[in-house]
Image: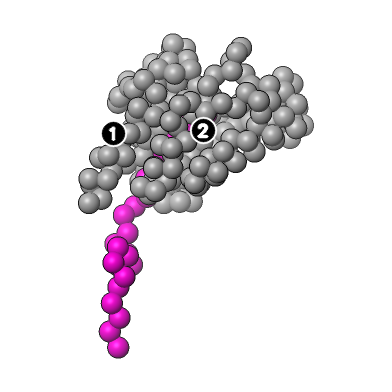
Amino acid sequence: MDHERPAGVPIPGTEPTPRGLFLDVWGTLLELPPGGAARGPGDVKFLPGVLDALYAAHRSGWKLYLVGNDFEVALGRRDERDQARIEETIAGAIADAGSVLTRSYVCTKHPSGSGRFKGDSVYMLPGTGAFYHAVHTDGIAMADSWVVGDSTLELVAGWRAGLHTCGVSTGLGLRDREYEVEIDTRFPSLFDFLSPLLERSFHRAG
């Protein structure tokens, strides 16, 4: 018996390879707190338009990842319970906005840390472990994926892995100059970058 395939459902094996958006957290997704480091969940403030843009990206088929180094607990500058509440607040806000966070690769370990936060991590930037893990685990197309950040740290990591790179003028606005990296593009904010990117994605899918 012949069965008609529902409209919009691809033939198995013809689905497009997923693409990833690797987003720095502080200064890109969220406002950079006074002093540069959050103390608790009260410092979690999403930049304008970001949550709506993440929802649109998710609906367009992009996989969403968080990247960055956050050594505050490891170096004794933040309580572990506050760290957990910060992470829960970020993930909860993204979920409440209708988006799905595929995975957080934010590195909280440091060689000079203590307890379970002491040591190296393959996810520590500017290493490229987070991107390759996403390739092996989620099958994303590295060459079609983007890393977006306000500092040269995450951008040089994405560049080394072969991703497209976008710098934003929020947060540090690339003023750190810690690494030499030639980025593909620069926008005033994550929202300003995602809007045209998703427009191109829509037309390509159509």
N-term-proximal mark, 2 vs 1: 2
Residue at 49%, 46% (x, y): give it.
Answer: 98
Q: Which residue is under mark 2?
A: 67
Q: CB of mark 2 within 8 Å of CB of mark 1?
A: no
Q: Which residue is under mark 1?
A: 196
Q: In screen coordinates, is 114 left or right of 155?
A: right
Which mark is nearer the camera, 2 or 1? 1
* Figure quadrant of residue 148: top left
Per the image, label 1 sits on a secondary structure element best described as helix
Q: Which residues are magenta?
A: 1-25
Residue at 44%, 11% (x, y): give it.
Answer: 175
Residue sitting nearer the eye, 27 or 122: 27
Per the image, label 2 sits on a secondary structure element best described as strand
Tell me the kind of residue under disc 1: Pro
Residue sitting nearer the eye, 166 or 6: 6
- Label 2 to label 1: alpha-carbon separation: 22 Å
